[in-house]
Each structure stands twice: as structure tokens, then as C-alpha cells.
Image (spheres, rainbow, N blue to C red):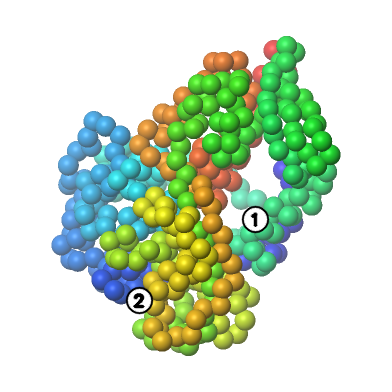
Amino acid sequence: MQLDSGLKNELVLGDPNAPRFVLWNGKLRPVPSKPTDLPLFDLMSIPGKIRAGFGAIGLRPSPPGHEETVEEFVRRNLGSEVFERLIEPFCSGVYAGDPSKLSMKAAFGKVWKLEQNGGSIIGGTIKAIQEKSSIPKTPRDPRLPKPKGQTVGSFRKGLIMLPNAIFSRLGNKVKLSWNLSSITKSDNGLYTLLYETPDGMVSLESKSVVMTVPSYVASSILHPVSAVAADSLSKFYYPPVAAVTISYPKEAIREECLIDGELKGFGQLHPRSQGVETLGTIYSSSLFPNRAPPGRILLLNYIGGVTNTGIMSKTESQLVEAVDRDLRKMLINPNAQEPLVLGIRKWPQAIPQFNVGHLDVLDAAKSALNDGGFKGVFLGGNYVSGVALGRCVEGAYEVAAEVTDFLSFVQTS
């Protein structure tokens, strides 16, 4: 059964043509959004562009005999400039991670497969297009919105509208403030789930269990039933990240950062080599309507990650000070008034790192559950599917299909 959240009319999509920027040598430089941008954008030098082009068509060193990091893969295929000025800040912005440790296969599997399948990035792209064109298209659900290109989306009152809508549609099938204490398997093949609830301990039985909690939480719960699976799940690292939401008056934006008198764009990313702490900034009020009153802008900033775990010892005012200091180096006028602070949130364990060996460790955890007699326990969440919201949704569908197959097998056996 598929459930419609009823939020189609509340969905707001960002402008697919909104520029992205990367800080390089003290200036915010636009990232190319289409092939025609490649010759003119100033984020890379002409030699760097030529090196990337030759590498993309296959004129580069052959793949090594080991699992490559993101840094190794990109430097080998596209050159150092692409890595240092595009991919490194992207890894910092998406994973808050270290590309010298992130696995290309695990973190950016679709790009990794291009070279595997086509002998080069361009060859793999052509082959993928050919294969896609040979497969009949599945009719698009007419209820779905139709974005006018690759973009991001939210809801009129923020992403919180989605879980709230799902909860309202499912009603009492969703239990809040229920903490799973333990899982055991009965002789009849059912799983017994023991919950701590506001009304005391509650026990439930189920044929299958899907765990979408962080891996370290799943590790703690599963340790009594499978020490091997728990040990594997405990190996994933989640660095700390803080989100700092602040607002400035429009006149605080530097003149050179305005487009037609407005702050336009998706946001900006900051390579670790550029001397700023902030990982990146999203232009919230430029992307989505009603995020700020007239005359003001709203900026969502991320700070921390693998290379800056010291943020956990900083106070909220210190985090705001660090972000404000960084923004005044490239986006905000140095003499602008102090920002209005809307919100600060610190996550001690924020984003799972898809480091080299990630997929092997994940497979080991799944195998330990299956081989240990716990085939009805499924692992899900962002450390399984990927950290992007879209991949989490896709991963949820994939796990749902696995559960359906399992229950069908159990019913017929």
C-alpha cells in the first residue's frame, strides 16, 4: 500500500538554474552548471580544464588494484584542480568528510560505475544513456510534481511538514517516544520487541524488523543477539556538525555578490585550503519563498565535520562568531551590522562516513544477521542507502521490497 502525504501543493522547488559558488583565492566563483559554461568559468585554469577533458575521455592512468578513495579517483581521472576546487569542497559540504578517506565506490557509486562499465567517465556516460534509452520508460505517476530540471525541494513551512503529514495520515500506527530496548527471537520464529514508553514497558511481536536508527544505536540493540553484526555496525564513524541559521539585512551583501541587485543562487562551498572554518552556506531565502521578511536574507551555515571536530567544545555564540567571521571574508560587508541568530543546532554524531571498506563492513553486518538466524531483521537508514534525502527515500523503497519478498517467502514456506 502506498500512502500519499497530501503535501503536493505545499512543495516548493528551488530554481534549477540557481548558481552554485565555490570560494577560491578570496572570491566566490560560479560552478559550471551546463557544458556551455565549461570554457568560460574561472574556477579552474585552462590547463586544468584540458587535463580534466583528457581524463574524462580515458587518457589517464588505469585504475589501481585496490578500492580508491575519492581523492585518488578524481586526481587520477580528472586532475588535481577538479579535486581541489570542486570535489573536495563538495565532499565537505555533503559528507562533512575527508575525501582522502571516503570511498569513491561507496560515496559516489554512480560515478565510479561509469568508469567500470565504459572504460572512462565519458565512455560510461554514453553507455548508460544508450542502456537507458533501450529500456521502456515507466509511466510517470500524474500525482507527482514536475520540476523543470535538476533542483532541490522543501515545503512551505520547512521539511518538518513531511514527517508531520506522514504521522497525521498513519495516525495511531506511529508511536512517539517509544525507545526500543531489546530484540529477541522466539521459538515460533517471531521477533519480540521490548519498548520503553511513557506508559511503561511494552512488548510487541513481529515477523520482521526494519532498523533505520543510526548504526551505533543499532549496534547497541543488536549486540545481545549478534555480537558480530554489532561489532561491524560500531565501526562507522559519525563526525560532529553544527547548523547555524542567521539573517542579515539585504544591504549587508557585498555588491559583487549580487545578481540584478539580489542575492541569487543555491549557496556556496568552501574548500578546506581556503582558510575558513565554515563548510558551506545555503541561501535559504533565495531558494524558497517566505523564508525571510522583505529586506532581509536567511543563510543556513554548516560547520564542523571530520576536519574540525573541535566545534563540540564551542559555545553557540562562538559558533555564530566563527560563521559571521567567515562570511565577512567573501559574502557580507565587513562593516555590516551583527547578524540576527535564528537557530543553532549541534549534532555530536551527524553524518556517517562512507570511508574505504564501508560496503564490506555493511555486508559483514547483514551477513552476520542472516547467517545467525535473524533473516527478518533489515538494516536501513542513511549509512546504508546514502546520506542525501533522495537516496534515503530510494533506500526505503528498496528495503520495503526486501521485506515484502521475505514475508512472501515466510508465508509460503
Residue 2 figure quarter? top right
Considering the numbered disc 1 on the image, is that residue within a helix, a strand or a loop? Answer: loop
**Between residues 4 and 71, which one lies in front from this camera angle?**
71
**Does residue 347 lie above or below 180 as drawn?**
below
Amino acid carrying label 1: it is Leu
Q: Position of residue 60 (x, y in %)?
A: 18, 45
Label 1 packing within 10 angstroms: few (<14), some (14-19), many (20+):
few
Q: Is residue 286 left or right of residue 127?
A: right
Considering the numbered disc 2 on the image, is that residue within a helix, a strand or a loop? Answer: loop
Q: Position of residue 77 (x, y in %)?
A: 23, 47
Report the disc number at residue 144: 1
Quadrant assignment for the N terminus: top right
**Does residue 362 lie above or below 275 as drawn?**
above
Residue 298 figure quarter? bottom right
Mark 2 vs 1: CB contact within 8 A: no
- Can see residue 278? yes
At 42% from the left and 69% from the top, the residue drawn is 322
- Give the alpha-carbon distance from disc 2 to disc 1, as whole Å: 42 Å
Report the disc number at residue 8: none
Amino acid carrying label 2: it is Lys
Residue 62 figure quarter? top left
At 49% from the left and 32% from the top, the residue drawn is 234
Label 2 packing within 10 angstroms: few (<14), some (14-19), many (20+):
some
Question: Of circles 2 and 1, which is in front?
Answer: 2
At 39% from the left and 50% from the top, the residue drawn is 306
Quickly name the residue at label 2: 329
- Can see residue 401? no
